[in-house]
Structure formats: C-alpha cells, structure tokens
C-alpha cells in the first residue's frame, strides 16, 4: 500500500506529487498516454500576478520567487513578455474596469502603435500596458517536477483511467482500466474530471464546471517579427493574442460550459473571436495554421478548491484552478503539501477558508 495516490497528471497533479514525495510513497495516475495532455498542455503559459480572483492573485504573488529562482545552472522559468490592453470608443467602461483590475498604466495610442504596428489607428482609441507579465516555461516546469517526483521514489503511470473507487480498512482502493491500486490517501487533481472522481468515491460533487477555451495559431501577421510584442488583450477580454515561436496565437477568450472531454475548438466561436481581433488590426486573417481547445475548470464561486474533504478521511481536493493553474502552481503545491503534512501554511486563515472544500457543501 502506498501513502498517496494522486489522480491527474497535469501541472497540479505533478506539483502535488513532487511535494508529497517528500512525505511518503507516491503514485500518480494519468488517464492519457502522456502527462500534461489536457489543460496543462494547452495553456497560454503566462505569469500575470494581477489576473484572477483575490485568492489566485495571492497564490501567484507567492509563486514569483520560485519562478524567478535559478536552479541546476538554469535560468528563471520566466521570460519577458508584457501585456497590452486595447479598446475602441464604445468600450470605455470595459476598458476602465480592466485597467483597474489588471493594474495597468494607460498609454497614448501612438505608443501602442509603435510597439505593435498592426494595430489599427482608425479603430483603437485607448491603450494601456505594463511590463510585469511574463512567459512561463511550462514544459520545463512540468519536466522538472516530474523528475523531482521520480527521484524521490515516486511513480507516474499513464493510460490509467479510473473506473472505480472504494473505501478499505486502511484507506482506499482505486481500480483503473488495467490495474488496482491501494493507498492511504487520495489527492484529487483530476481537473475537469475532479467531480467525477469524487462521485466514484461516494461523495456528492462540489459543482466544478469545465469551460472550453479555444485557440488558433496564425502565421506572423504581415511578415512582422512578433518575438518582442506583448500579449494583446481586447477590452472586456473579448479576445487575446500572444506571440509564440514566431507565430501569433489568438483566442476568442470563450468560456463555454461543457462536460469533461478531450476538447476541440468550435469553428463558429473561433471565427467570431478572430473577427473581434481582426477589427482591431490592419492585417486580415488569411490562414489559420492550426486550432485547438482546452478546458478551464471552475468552482461555482470561481475560487480553487484545495484541502481535505470534511465528509470522509483521506480524500484531498486540489482542483478548480480555472485558467490560472500554472501561474499559481508553485505556491499552491506548497500549500497542499503543508495541509497534508499538518504544517502551518504561509497564508493567512482567511485565504485557507476561501479555498477549503467545505465552503461549497
């Protein structure tokens, strides 16, 4: 019997496993062929401390030190990107709300045009920016945490879709499509499937809702070098665009409620989002190289669910990170480790109460 069975092989599960391997034996189960297949493999990979609800902002701020650390001779996990908000004349209210929420500094539109030459001066009437938003090397982060988990004696097993969960005298028995696992404690890091896992364990769901977000990859517009452009966001988050590997990723910033699934982009939703982007620029979209979608999973109040389920012993929730999982992952994983180890977390009791699963019961 192992000490901790982590269900879910995204960044949450991998981070939890790396922390818990310091406390005892760990086995991580992932239903797909590879770790990080779903939401974690389809992230925009941005670190933006001022993005998200208050609990996420606190966890993200506490994650910065880890992201900026240099370990094993490697550079920080972060690299400069910047964020620019743009709006048109009928979007003043939404623009002002984003300006406050994201703690941006309004700049003259001419400055924005000089930075991002495809912006349309006939449409863009306001702009704001800051330099603190950064890219996260998400691939390296997941590889480093997977390596730490394995070096500490933990296991990762893929193609292990959970089919049944039952209580035993010592803890839990978890049956997958090919194996049976016994563990003293379960960590539910199953992302969009977290409520499904809870129901298998005999627990009523907490109301976690997966929401689809689509993305299109475009060639660099107008042949421009987009390497140093900031991430662009339309007022009211009606769309965003992010340079990546010489291309431009554009999302309609959709949030359609769906069942847990291997998500795909909705062509109509993607077309509507691309039209909102096109309205703000001078270069039309002539070709979409590829498109995809991921699931961002939210609790009813929009705040993650971290901690022990009060209804049964040995069942821990680590889910509902929404679209903020990577930027808050280091502090979130430390917090979960502290809770399971019985250590006093670095965060104040109000934050712990805001994250606790019992609030949703």
Image (cartoon, rainbow, N blue to C red):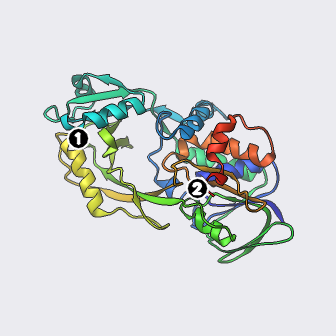
Q: Which secondary structure, mark 1?
A: helix
Q: Is residue 22 visible?
A: no
Tell me which residue sits at (13%, 33%) in the image: 122
Q: CA distance from mark 2 to mark 1?
A: 35 Å
Tell me which residue sits at (68%, 34%) in the image: 348
Mark sitting earlier along the chain (2/1):
2
Q: Residues within 10 Å of mark 1 (few under 14, many from 20)?
A: few
- Coordinates of residue 261 in the picture (x, y in percent): 48, 68
Decide: is 331 above or below 5. above
Q: Quadrant of the C terminus?
A: bottom right
305 with respect to 296 (left or right): right
Tell me which residue sits at (29%, 50%) in the image: 218
Name of the residue lying farthest toward the left: 122
- How many numbered dots are placed on residues in this image? 2
Q: Nearer the viewer, residue 238 or 111?
A: 238
Tell me which residue sits at (69%, 70%) in the image: 201
- Coordinates of residue 64 in the picture (x, y in percent): 58, 32
Q: Which residue is mark 2?
A: 10
- Coordinates of residue 344 in the picture (x, y in percent): 77, 38
Q: Residues within 10 Å of mark 2 (few under 14, many from 20)?
A: many
35 with respect to 211 (left or right): right
Q: Which secondary structure, mark 2?
A: loop
Q: Quadrant of the N terminus?
A: bottom right
Decide: is 238 above or below 294. above
Q: In the drawing, what numbered circle is on residue 201?
A: none
187 with respect to 68 (left or right): right
Q: Which residue is mark 1?
A: 223
- Coordinates of residue 57 in the picture (x, y in percent): 54, 36
């Amino acid at each position: 019997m192992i000490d901790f069975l982590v269900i879910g092989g995204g960044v949450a599960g991998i981070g939890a496993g790396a922390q818990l391997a310091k406390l005892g034996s760990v086995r991580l189960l992932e239903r797909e062929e590879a770790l990080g297949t779903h939401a974690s493999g389809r992230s925009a990979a941005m670190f933006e401390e001022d993005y998200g609800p208050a609990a996420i902002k606190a966890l993200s701020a506490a994650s910065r030190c880890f992201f900026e650390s240099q370990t094993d001779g490697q550079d920080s996990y972060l690299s400069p990107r910047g964020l620019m908000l743009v709006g048109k004349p009928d979007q003043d209210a939404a623009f002002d709300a984003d300006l406050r929420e994201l703690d941006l500094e309004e700049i003259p539109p001419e400055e924005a045009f000089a930075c991002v030459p495809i912006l349309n001066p006939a449409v863009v009437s306001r702009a704001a920016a800051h330099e603190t938003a950064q890219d996260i090397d998400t691939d390296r982060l997941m590889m480093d945490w997977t390596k730490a988990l394995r070096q500490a004696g933990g296991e990762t097993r893929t193609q292990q879709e959970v089919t049944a969960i039952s209580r035993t005298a010592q803890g839990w028995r978890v049956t997958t499509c090919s194996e049976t696992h016994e563990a003293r404690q379960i960590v539910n890091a199953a992302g969009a499937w977290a409520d499904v896992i809870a129901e298998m364990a005999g627990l009523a769901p907490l109301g976690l809702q997966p929401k689809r977000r689509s993305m299109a990859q475009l060639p660099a517009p107008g042949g421009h070098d987009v390497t140093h452009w900031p991430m662009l966001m339309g007022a009211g988050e009606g769309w965003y665009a992010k340079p990546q590997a010489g291309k431009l990723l554009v999302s309609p910033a959709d949030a359609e409620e769906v069942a847990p699934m291997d998500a795909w982009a909705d062509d109509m939703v993607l077309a509507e989002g691309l039209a909102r982007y096109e309205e703000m620029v001078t270069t039309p979209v002539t070709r979409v190289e590829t498109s995809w979608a991921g699931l961002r999973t939210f609790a009813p109040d929009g705040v993650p669910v971290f901690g022990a389920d009060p209804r049964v012993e040995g069942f821990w929730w680590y889910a509902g990170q929404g679209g903020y999982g990577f930027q808050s992952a280091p502090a979130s994983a430390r917090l979960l480790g502290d809770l399971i180890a019985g250590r006093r977390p670095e965060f104040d009791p109000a934050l712990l109460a805001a994250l606790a699963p019992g609030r949703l019961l």
